[in-house]
Image (tube, rainbow, N blue to C red):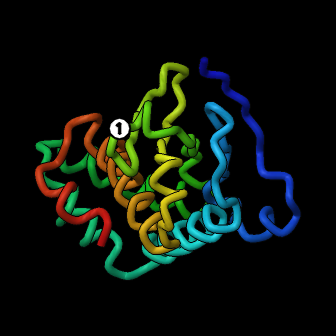
Amino acid sequence: DSTSTSAEIQDPLAQALIPPQIPLQLIVTNDALVNADLLNSATKLTSEKLVSFANSAEFMSVLSSVFGNAGTDTVAWNAAAESLKQTITQSGLNIRLSLQPSDVMGVAQGAYANDAGDGQETIYLNTDWIASRTTVDEIVTTQMEEIGHSIDFRLNNGVDSTRSEEHTSE
């Protein structure tokens, strides 16, 4: 029997650790237990890396190299890339983070849905994988890979770029 509860992290320390650029909404299924400190640390680091990347001089060239080969019109792609940069640095991507057990996730560490059935972009993380002595760096890598799918979707109107799978976790 699967029950879902939804809760924003209310701990003041956790709130301070998670920058507003990527609001974290945890949706826990089957009362999955996850080390909140580990997840908060990883999400904070993911947020910092993403904002730092968006503010870097090489942001546009890396985006073009990794996500610019899906056949999207150049003018539209450039406008979407500029909008993406502004979104990351100002309001955040606003992607929901949903924690799911391995009976839902299988062996996948993470997954991305551009529409989780309610119009909300969602990154799914496997709670059993997190609980199996996963490190902050491993969670960050998985979150960045899944965020890469969101970036690809936003830049290329849902068409996968051929190189995105190779580079998003770097």
Relative vertical location of residue 68 with respect to residue 50 in this rendering, above or below: above
Residue 151, position as x, y percentages in the image: 36, 51
Relative vertical location of residue 119 with respect to residue 108 in this rendering, above or below: above
Relative vertical location of residue 20 with respect to residue 159 in this rendering, above or below: below
Q: Residue drawn 50% across and 39% down?
A: 101
For label 1, the residue is 106
Q: Secondary structure at mark 1?
A: loop
Q: Is residue 79 visible?
A: no
Q: Is residue 41 left or right of residue 56?
A: right
Residue 164, position as x, y percentages in the image: 21, 55
Q: Is residue 131 left or right of residue 165?
A: right
Q: Is residue 81 left or right of residue 161?
A: right
Q: Residue drawn 50% across and 77% down?
A: 52
Tell me which amino acid carries mark 1. Gly
Q: Residue drawn 70% across and 67% down?
A: 37
Quadrant assignment, res 144 = bottom left
Residue 117, position as x, y percentages in the image: 49, 20
What quarter of the picture does the C terminus occupy?
bottom left
